[in-house]
Amino acid sequence: MEIPLMPSANPASAESRLDPALIRRNGAGRSIQRFNAQEALICAMVLMAASDRAMSDAELGMMSRLVQELPVFADFNAAEIEVVTETVLRLLDETDGLDRACVMIREALPPRLRETAYVLACEVAAADGDATQEELRFLQDLRIALDLDRLVAGAIERAARARYQVL
């Protein structure tokens, strides 16, 4: 899946594209203005996968596995991943979309789940091998947005690297 390299030339404002009338409607084209905790965790993974402008099959597979296996997603409808992904990609199409997405993640997550969001982003980064400069830059931005201690973030990153070492 290709991610646009440049913001859209569409003059519509973020507010008109995320009109409250569209929030949480069922069916295709559903838009999200505010994430719940599970959607925020998925947003962190999608942002990581999209940070280098393309989502690899390995990254998509990792996101799917994490949603299926982790207890935090036990009651999450996996079909909602597509809605969250579309919302995130629309946000990234805006000039300040990354910042808005990070704010939405922070606002949706209680402090105890902010480290979880960072862990999930690191897992996705590790899914396709070495992290790119764009992915490392995004991790730094996410760490700051989530107000995570540098040492905690470093330990999480190192643990993800260790998990995916190859011979």
Image: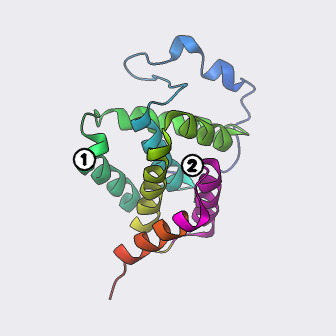
Magenta span: chief secondary structure? helix
Residue linked to disc 1: 68
Element carrying mark 1:
helix
Above or below, comparing residue 154 to residue 54 in the picture = below
Question: Is any part of residue 128 visible from this angle?
Answer: no
Question: Is any part of residue 148 visible from this angle?
Answer: yes
Q: In which quarter of the image is residue 74?
A: top left
Number of the label disc, if any, that sits on residue 3: 2
Span of residues in magenta = 131-152
Number of the label disc, if any, that sits on residue 45: none
Residue at position x 26%, y 46% from top?
71
> Quick one: which residue is furthest to the bottom in this view?
167
- Residue 94 placement, left or right of 165: right
Element carrying mark 2:
loop
Q: State yes or no: residue 27 in magenta.
A: no
Q: Residues within 10 Å of mark 2 (few under 14, many from 20)?
A: some
Discs 1/2, front: 1
Residue at position x 30%, y 34% from top?
79
